[in-house]
Image (tube, helix red, strand yellow):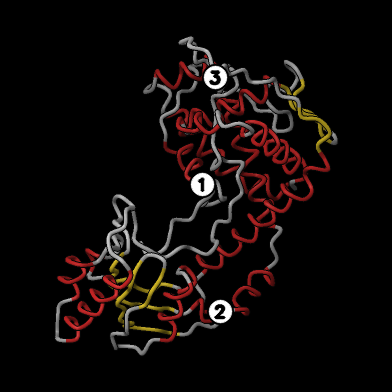
Amino acid sequence: MLHNKQRSFTGKRGLSAMLVLLLSLAVVMSACGKKTVDVTKAPASDQGTVVAEYKDGKVTDKEFDRYISFFSIVNPSAEAYLSIEGMKEQFLREYVGYKILYSRADAKAKDAASADVKTFVKQFEEAAKSDATMKAKMDKAGLTNADAEWFYRMIITVMDHSEQSVKDEEIKAIYDKAPTDFNNVSLRHILIGFKDPSTGEEKLKKEDALKKAKDVKAELEKGGDWTELAKKYSDDEGSKNKGGLYENQAPRVWVEAFKKAANSQEVGKIGDPVETEYGYHVIKVEKRETRTWEQVPDTIKKELRQSISTNNLNKFMSDELPGLITKIELPKETTDKTSNSTDTSKDSGQAGTGTDTGTSTDTNTEKKEEGAAK
């Protein structure tokens, strides 16, 4: 695609793909009846050794291990990230942050989360008979379905509360700052890339890419078929098989040079090649409509709300949280780098998540990078 995917905890709460996984992966539940979840008490918070203390609370190693295991189950690749030095401590700090924010959430946010939690639990139950491997992982970690429900509820509630706190005026202020970012644009383009989209290696030098782009433009101006030429020349995997078409898009999702062309190039005319960090783009704007704030689709307004919300969460984590934590004391991880031993085991709490976990708060709708899809 022209723009990169929204990271993040995107989707409903900025929880990245992982909360989608929570709702779709087949994860095993125990065969016994569903237990009532205490929404105020974290799983295993009264067991084990204290590894973190903060104003009005603490985290134990047993509790934290279950939280890590929760993400290890929904995102098996996350284990590798926690093996990076300092990552486990960072994840613990973020977990503390989420516990604090959960305690601050109001009833409205908790009610808003209920539907998602029900869906989550239902998915667990429906998968109960199908995945023995997941069940074994849960049993090994001591993670129960009730624990997973608690962690999920905490994250969803925090996200809902943060979104509810965003004022409508804050959202509109983004539009007021750059109304043309919200135009409704349909365009076609062919990208002559500097790099091979499949390998990332240099494909063409700038001067060669520009010459090729000019040649493509000349072919199009002579009546060349966009569908045929895009398929033949374009390095943008997101549009090359659609005649280079991006339809009814808001330019805000594109990087500056491409966005400027989308908003200023004469409609119906093939413009001179436009350079971005990805290559040269031959662009034809087919439609451009201005939008008042009232005409901006609700889906875009929701993205803006999520973006502001996530920025606020990031600010809390970076600015306020450090002053609330009074103790972080994780066991030292022992790794003998000089040993020839075949023992490669790591700290038992190291099955977990990575930098793109449910406790990350990267902006949902931050400026997307425009370029060829990999």
Residue under circle 3?
Answer: 337
In terms of sequence position, does the residue under pointer 2 or pointer 3 come before the other?
Answer: 2
Q: Is residue 144 left or right of residue 235?
A: right
In terms of sequence position, does the residue under pointer 2 or pointer 1 come before the other?
Answer: 1
Q: Is residue 146 left or right of residue 53?
A: left
Q: CA distance from mark 3 to mark 1?
A: 34 Å
Provide residue 137's location: percent of width, then percent of height: 48, 19
User: The residue tagged with tag 1: helix, strand or loop?
Assistant: helix
Residue type at tag 1 = Ser
Q: Between residues 218 and 164, which one lies in front from this camera angle?
A: 218
Residue type at tag 2 = Glu
Provide residue 222's location: percent of width, then percent of height: 14, 86
The answer to whether 39 is drawn above or below residue 285 in the figure is above
The answer to whether 195 is drawn above or below residue 103 in the figure is below
Residue under circle 2?
Answer: 294
Residue type at tag 3 = Lys
Q: CA distance from mark 2 to mark 3?
A: 61 Å
Residue, x 65% and y 38% (percent of image)?
154
Residue, x 48% and y 9% (percent of image)?
341
Label 3: how many Cα within 10 Å (few below 14, some 14–19, many 20+) = few
Quarter where residue 365 is shown = bottom right
Quarter where residue 228 is shown = bottom left
The answer to whether 349 is drawn above or below residue 97 in the figure is above
Provide residue 92's location: percent of width, then percent of height: 68, 33
Residue, x 47% and y 43% (percent of image)?
20
Q: CA distance from mark 2 to mark 1?
A: 29 Å
Label 1: how many Cα within 10 Å (few below 14, some 14–19, many 20+) = many
Quadrant location of the N terminus in the rendered image: bottom left
Per the rendering, the mark at residue 16 is 1
User: The residue tagged with tag 3: helix, strand or loop?
Assistant: loop
User: The residue tagged with tag 2: helix, strand or loop?
Assistant: helix
Provide residue 109's location: percent of width, then percent of height: 68, 49
